[in-house]
Structure formats: C-alpha cells, structure tokens
Image (cartoon, rainbow, N blue to C red):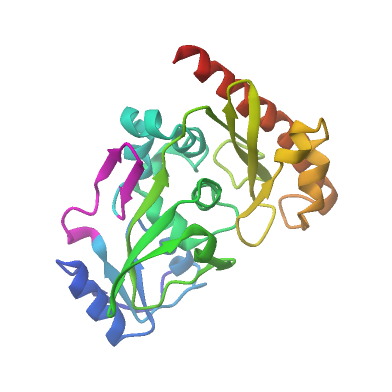
C-alpha cells in the first residue's frame, strides 16, 4: 500500500518545528522514520503532515559526561552502538542496542525516536525507564524535562504534547559498584522480542544493595521491578518478577510461554548482572 496524502515540512530549527506542530494537531514528527514510515505505508497512521527534523543542526550529538550520556534526537542507533565512550559510561546502552532490529534499520532509526514511539516491544524505552533517565522536550511553553517514570502512559503513547519535540534523552552513568545485563528471546535476531529483560545491580563492597529489572514485550508500558530483597534474601527473582507482571498473549507468544520466558530470563539476567558488577569491581 501507499501512504495517504500528507504535507511535508523540513524546518531549520526546533522552534520552527514546534510552530508547525502547534498549527496542525494532526501533524507528526519524522526523525529516523523506521517506525513511522511502515505505519504510513500500511495506513495505520494518516497524519495531515510530516515535520522532518533532519535539517535541524546539532540534534545528532552524543554527549558523554561524568553524570551520563545525552543522546540527541537525530543520533542513529548505529552511532550510539558504536560509541565506545557511551558504552564505557553506561554499558547497558550497547547491550540493548545490539538487539534493536537489524543493522540497516539501526543505520537510520534514532534512539530518541524509538523511545518516544513507546512501542512495548522496543528495547530503549525499557532501558531509559530502568536507568531512571529522562527526555528533554521543547514546545510552545518552552523546554521541559520529563522523567522516564512519567513519560510512558500507554502502548505507543507518551505524556508529550502533540506540539512538543523530544530533542534529547539522558541515560545516567553506571555508578561505582554497578553491573548490568540484558537478554531477550525472539524467533530470529532482530525480530520483535517475545520477552526481554534488562537488569541493573549495585554492590557496596561485598554486599548487594540494589537489584532492579525492566521488561520488554511483557507490559503495555515499561515496568521496573525492584528485586533487591528477593535476591539478597535468597529468593527466586523469576517468580518475584512474574508476581508484578501480567504477560499477555499475542501473535508472537502465548501468555503462558511469555510468563515462562520472564521466569527464566530474569534468573539468568540477574545472575549475569551480579557477575558483571563483581567483574567491574575487580578491574578498578
């Protein structure tokens, strides 16, 4: 199929993009287009106009500081994945981005675009939520920072206004004593995951003081489960995680199979994150 007719705008500044969106409530932002364009082609989306951010300067930056990694709205998945500085600051970025679709899509798709698209099967919304990151948005009222906990309100739905442009996303750095791990199961690498788990842990000396897990393709929005007490008490993190989730059936997996994946992956990824934290403490 072909997309329904739409107007096309290519603003030269964020302010101009915001103005175009404010003037047309049915307009959509275009960055990498790897999620939006297929929806247009299948006529599952029919915006009146596209506002292409591609000509706006400085939105493709990847800035690494002691506090964390700030990724601009036009930074491609591939660029973030290949950034050794970003991986050193927050290794969960690289671990998760390796599972995002296929190289051709990563070469065009944007990390911030994936986040604000808010697909429950996407990896980067879960990573942002698990790490306690945030998104900077610009709209008619100015610039604001939206914490990840307040960003996702439903499948393919965020708390951003139709006239706001997400200009960057911030991922906090891995703290001292921290460790991370990520794993997902898909029918083929690059396909939508049937389930995925990201885990971040933190040690203080020999003591494990934090264990949190985020889940891909399990809930309508990214869900983070605190497993600290369960893991430090010798309990089963897989069963504990499942108690906080309600896996549903879809074309990719039954509810029971997805629940079993949550059990197995959570146990496996928690163990891997703990091992990662131990390994990092030995190299410091």
Using the image, determine if residue 144 lies above or below residue 252. Answer: below
Quadrant occupied by the C terminus: top left
The total number of labels drawn is: 0
Direction from residue 18 to residue 180 in the image, left or right: right
User: Which residue is at 14% across, 66% downward?
Assistant: 12
Residue 154 in picture, x, y percent from top left: 59, 68
Q: Which residues are magenta?
A: 54-73
* Residue 38 visible in the shown view: no
Vertical arrangement, residue 270 with respect to residue 46, above or below? above
Any magenta on residue 57?
A: yes
| Image coords of residue 195 (percent x, y) | 68, 45
Give x and y (percent) for residue 29. Answer: 34, 69
Nearer-the-camera pick, 154 or 239:
239
Q: Residue at x 61, y 28 (%)?
A: 273
Viewer-nearest residue: 233 or 252:
233
| Residue 237 belongs to magenta span | no
Q: Which residue is at the front of the view, 61 or 44?
A: 61
Apparent side of residue 254 relative to residue 84 in the rendered image (left or right)? right
User: Visible in this render: residue 201?
Assistant: yes
Residue 144 lies, in percent from the top left, at 34, 68
For this orientation, the residue located farthest to the top is: 282
Q: Which quarter of the figure has residue 145?
A: bottom left
């Amino acid at each position: 199929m072909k997309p329904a007719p739409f107007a096309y705008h290519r603003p030269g500044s964020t302010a101009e993009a915001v103005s175009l969106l404010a003037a047309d409530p049915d307009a959509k932002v275009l960055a990498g287009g790897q999620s939006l364009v297929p929806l247009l082609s299948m006529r599952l989306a029919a915006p009146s106009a596209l506002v292409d951010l591609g000509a706006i300067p400085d939105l493709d930056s990847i800035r690494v500081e002691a506090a964390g990694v700030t990724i601009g709205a036009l930074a491609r998945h591939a660029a973030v994945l290949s950034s050794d500085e970003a991986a050193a600051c927050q290794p969960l970025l690289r671990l998760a981005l390796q599972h995002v679709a296929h190289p051709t899509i990563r070469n065009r798709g944007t990390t911030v675009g994936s986040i604000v698209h808010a697909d429950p099967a996407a990896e980067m919304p879960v990573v942002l939520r698990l790490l306690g990151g945030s998104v900077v948005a610009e709209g008619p009222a100015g610039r604001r920072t939206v914490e990840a906990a307040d960003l996702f309100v439903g499948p393919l739905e965020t708390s951003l206004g139709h006239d706001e442009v997400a200009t960057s996303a911030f991922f906090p750095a891995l703290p001292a004593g921290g460790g991370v791990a990520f794993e997902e199961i898909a029918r083929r690498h690059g396909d939508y995951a049937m389930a995925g788990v990201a885990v971040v842990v933190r040690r203080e000396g020999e003591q494990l003081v934090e264990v949190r897990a985020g889940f891909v393709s399990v809930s309508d929005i990214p869900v983070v489960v605190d497993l600290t007490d369960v893991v430090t008490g010798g309990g089963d993190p897989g069963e504990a995680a499942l108690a906080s989730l309600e896996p549903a059936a879809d074309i990719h997996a039954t509810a029971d199979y997805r629940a079993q994946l949550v059990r197995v992956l959570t146990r496996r990824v928690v163990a891997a994150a703990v091992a990662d934290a131990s390994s990092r403490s030995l190299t410091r």
